[in-house]
Amino acid sequence: MKKIFRSGFLALCFAFVLALSPRAVEYDWQTLYKGEIRTLLSDGDPHYLLLADIDLDGTPELFGGSGPLSPLVPLATCSNGKLMELSLAPGSQTPTSVLQNLRLSFNSETGETLLTCEGNDPAGGYALWELSMENGQLLCRKRFAYQENGNSTSYFMWKSGQLATVSGSEYRTAMDRFWEGFATQNDTLTAQSFFSGGYRSQDVDKFLQSYSPAPVLALPTQVSVTINGSPLSLGVYNIDGNNYFKLRDLAAALNGTNKQYNVGWDNMTRQVSIERGKPYQPVAGEISLPLGTTPTLGRQPKDALSLDGRTVDTQKYNIGGNNYFKLRDLAELLNFQVLWDNSSRTIRIDTTKSYSQS
């Protein structure tokens, strides 16, 4: 199933409550998976492990098999700093080793994403599988396949809830319709490694660190925002239940308050810089356009952020050429209060009060 987010009002409100509610102690996915992998490798048997972010939420899912050519069993996923078992959705097929060829396609007009992998079919011939997450479970479905038998070719496609035999013309027409409007993204989506001889911490660390963050789905959301009681309009993206603000938009909004800051770029260190207490200086030609309603893709930039000359760790994404930062990270760095007012559905920023997780 092609993946698209058409978030309704209640769903968005719930997301904002999660994004602005008190945060419990959370663990990063690398730490959680390392413990899971340690248990898995303790049997001393060979294991092939693969990481892939199927739901495009910024955290990869963990898969495992007995070898690079074996079926891959979904093992675990992480959400809100908690490790959870990952199981197959009803009717799902077990992913094959071609999962390592995972590719992402995106329709910029509709905001739909498509995760597919293709390669040799264990049943014979060549096949294309589509993957998605359905209610926290993995759904893997063979959408297209063909087998060459001497001078003839048999074609198959998912039709009416099953893999059915079709003609070559119907196969090609359906394939064209399947890809219509989608552009393949040139991102590396998986990391994989083969382990034998038990658990070695350095080998597991190397595997986990080899994963390059995949693009995430960013949902534009129109919410009310106030700063020190004054309403203003700011474009906000919601990514995995968290609110992300454009760094320069927030700088302009906070200008003249006791938490104002300027934004710069240090070309020598390749860092975006924040200078607290300095008036914000807009960039020539800078225009903050409405976000619209269509989901888009965000990517983690490689450049770091410096705060008054000190490199700091923050969650950020580059969306449409602009850096968007998690609001709570910025509130903590700049030390201002951020609250969610459920009665008026408003994000309230108060620069006269200190940041608090509660």
Image (tube, grey):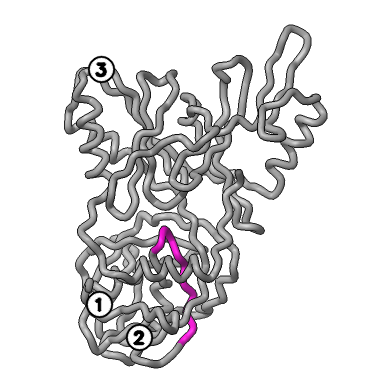
Residue type at mark 2 is Leu
Q: Which quadrant would the C terminus be assigned to in this image?
A: bottom left
* In this picture, residue 148 sits left or right of residue 53: right
Specify the quadrant of the image occupied by residue 352. bottom left
**Amino acid carrying mark 3 in the image:** Asp
Question: Which portion, as a residue range, is magenta?
Answer: 232-241
Does 121 sit left or right of 301 as displayed? right
Earlier sequence position, callout 3 versus callout 2 = 3
**Residue 124 higher or lower than 55, as above or below:** above
Q: State yes or no: discs 1 and 2 in contact (Cβ < 8 Å).
A: yes
Q: Give the label, 1 or 3, closer to the camera.
A: 3
Which quadrant does the N terminus fall into? top right
* Numbered tag placed on residue 270 in the rendering: none
Query: Which residue is at a point 37% across and 23% down the rendered structure image?
Result: 65
125 vs 76, left or right, is right
Near mark 1 (Cα within 10 A), the count class, few <14, some 14-19 or many ≥20, is many
Q: Mark 3 sits on what residue?
A: 45
Q: Is residue 256 above or below residue 273?
A: below
Identity, as a three-letter code, of the amino acid under mark 1: Leu
Spot occupied by residue 134 in the image (x, y as percentages of width and height):
50, 45
Binning the other alpha carbons within 10 Å of mark 2 as few (below 14), some (14 to 19) or many (20 upward) gives many
Query: Mark number for residue 254?
Result: 2
Residue 226 percent location from the top left of the image: 40, 86
Q: Residue furthest front?
A: 90
Q: Nearer the viewer, residue 320 or 179?
A: 179
If you read the primary sequence from the N terminus, does the residue marked by circle 1 or circle 2 appear first?
2
Measure the alpha-carbon separation of dots 1 and 2. Answer: 11 Å
Residue beneath disc 1: 334
Q: Position of residue 107 (x, y in %)?
A: 63, 52
Q: Give the alpha-carbon distance from disc 1 to disc 3, as whole Å.
A: 50 Å
